[in-house]
Amino acid sequence: MTVSTASATAAKAAPLEAGAARKAIDRVGLPGWIQAMPFGLVFLFFFVIPLILVVIVSFWDYNDYEMLPSFTTRSYTETFEGCLTQLPDLCTILKTYLSTVKFCFIVWVTTLIIGFTVAYFLAFYVRTVTMQMVLFLVCTIPFWTSNVIRMISWIPLLGRNGLINLALERAHLVDKPVEWLLYSPFSVGLAFTHLFTFFMVVPIFNSMMRIDRRLVEAAYDSGASAWQTLWNLIIPLCKPGIVIGSIFVVTIVMGDFITFDVMGGEQIASAGKVVETRLNALQFPPAAANAVILLVVTLMIIVGLNRIVDVRKEL
Amino acid sequence: MSMKHVKTAKGVSRRALLKGAAGIAGAAAGSGAITGFPYVWSQEDKVLRYLGTAVNQSDDITKKVKEDTGITIQNIVATTDDVTKRVITQPNSFDVLDTEYFSLKKLVPSGNILPMDAKKIKEFDNITPVFTKGQLPNGKVIGDQGTAPKKVMFLEGEHSTKFSATPTEWVTLIPTVYNADTLGIRPDLIKRPIEHWAELLNPEFKGKAAILNIPSIGIMDAAMVVESIGKYKYPDKGNMTKPEIDMTMGVLTEAKKAGQFRAFWKDFNESVNLMASGETVIQSMWSPAVTAVRSKGIPCIFQPLKEGYRSWASGFCMSKGVTPKQADMVYEFVNWYLSGWAGAYLNRQGYYSAVLSTAKANMEPYEWAYWMEGKPAEKDIHAPDGSLIEKAGAVRDGGSYDDRMGNVACWNAVMDENDYMVRKWNEFIAS
């Protein structure tokens, strides 16, 4: 993403150079499919083939210690067990997905609001490109440490005897420690927001930098208020960035289980966790089946997002 | 930056790279990493890849093995689940395996491991009868619910995948280490005696309890609670029927919905942190984890309970991929392991060793009295790494070997209905 933002700003400065480079490639005359092949092969071997294997395995049978190659829908039927008979009570898999999608939505809203605000500040309030780049890089600093460390560092802060509870008690705001700060939906949402807001900032900032500033001036000259400019001009033009950021956040949260475990005290269900539990019990076919279900649900969400904005057309 | 500049820069870096690569290759040849010289082999070859769960794997042991036998141990450390996964999917990635008895129900039918020949184990007859007969050295019979070692200790033949009810020459696992687990508590925060498993789900500790997030173990702790509150008496807590699983998970689910649990834990450090930070005051725990909390200066007790302990045990076997020469080395290593030094090392951490007599010979009398006989410590008790565990005068939680192992109620297990249980566990997490 940083490359594309950099090139976006660079492209304006030197369109000629880019054109020259394009011509140079044309002269070499390699057909397009050969140029695409290295990446295509990587995709084939490390994405397409493993995915096909996962789908195949999800239809295999299994026992305590091995997979039995045959065709059975056992892994799927058992996963969806009780989904019709238990109604109106929700079955396990629906409850799990409800919980996962709920977090997805909450995290999407919080990262979008914060990410959009940060990007807006960077793009429209910071005057010089140098300063923009400096501040943008500052945003990446947290990424110098690992995901898990950034997550775990919340625990001493939010715990029953953590810093926040200590401060609240010292200030006599509460007489008993606040329990919902840690190992709760709150802490999971907080950690997700902290971890993934940057994935919103980058594409939205990228979109904002492409907005022709003369449009903003025109809106101002035509008497639009700041709010009207934001709502009628900037947000519509940022849509591709918002959708790309949303895809990042949604896919990561849908497949996550470590954040759920560490921040939720392993008590909150998530789609990824079901796969993990099955894998740990050596039940590979149901793990594969749950992975396939997760993939389908996530793809459906992404297709839905693409319906709202055609990302390819907008880029 | 001009094109020309870029080119030279690239050229230089490539040359430097080649130089470096040649250097590395040269060093490798010089150091003997490139083989092909017959006389180098015999020395280089004494290497065993040792797959285990870190309980028995430490640098001290690796060093001592090398010193005494010349065998270089390459430790491969993984969680219990991952060890099992590795044996099933990559049986050639290790030579000697150290795993828990309850995993055997999954490992033995796969045919990926080889049993050990009892005749080649010098101390075999001195292995504690806890394993071979399910009794204490003094003859007291101990609880055998779940995967008690005696049920899965012997195979009908060398290449059989059937467990034998009576002792044979072919041993699935030569025992290394075992212990009796119970609840850990924070006496400073609970401020009253705890005597029963039922306390784990006592609403008094709402939001301050924790259990293991390993389904097969978590459900057994829950079963201890169910029996303790007098709700039900299981024929075998380690092998429940579907209705029993439903009922037990129901009890857990109710507690979870009422907010009984602060968190579930999966690894050693998590359990230490939960307890040390005061997030939990009562939880299922492992003995060295309790020691770890105490070594931070925080009071923590490995509380003996009326209903007894949940026990576990692990031991050694071989990969099916070993060569005859490697097999000899495995026997040499296992024989070394039972010869006392390692046993003493384990006993000093609060675990128990398989051959008591040899371990005793390698411990100071005051150490033996504290760890194994439940007597007050005559002198300060130190861990193998030298850190202070207890001051003189302290008594071990739960007392002597006979008191602790004698009160084992059940053993970690894999149930026949394991698949169903795992699905119910996912339902429990989602509730």
Image (tube, helix red, strand yellow):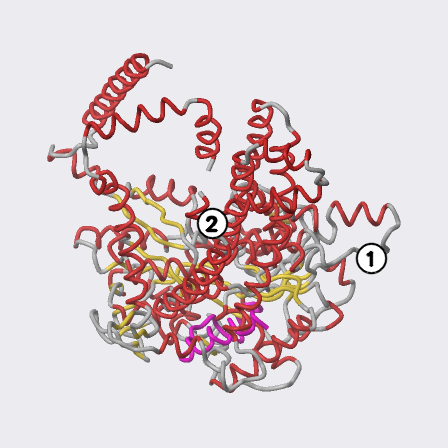
**Which amino acid type corresponds to the residue marked 2 in the rendered image?**
Tyr
Asked where in the image residue B99 lies, by quadrant, the reply is bottom left
Asked where in the image residue B417 lies, by quadrant, the reply is bottom left
Image quadrant containing the C terminus of chain A:
top left
**Which amino acid type corresponds to the residue marked 1 in the rendered image?**
Lys
Is B414 covered by the magenta stretch?
Answer: yes
Magenta residues, start to end = B403-431
Residue B183 pos. (x, y %): 62, 65
Which residue does the image show at 66% across and 66% down from the upper left? B261
In the depicted structure, whether residue B83 falls above or below residue A140:
below
Pick whichever, A211 or B330, lies toward us.
A211
Residue B5 pos. (x, y %): 32, 12
Mark 1: secondary structure: loop
Q: Tell me, yes or no, whether dots 1 and 2 are on the same chain.
A: no
Q: Chain of mark 2?
A: B
For label 1, count other residues whose C-alpha is less than 10 Å away and answer few (under 14), some (14-19) or many (20+): few
Residue B140 visible: no
Which of the labelled discs sits on residue B345, or is there none? 2
Which of the labelled discs sits on residue A134, or is there none? none
- Residue marked by disc 1: A176
Which residue does the image show at 53% across and 69% down from the upper left? A96
Residue B119 pos. (x, y %): 24, 64
Which residue does the image show at 65% across and 41% down from the upper left? A117
**Residue occupying the far right of the picture:** A172
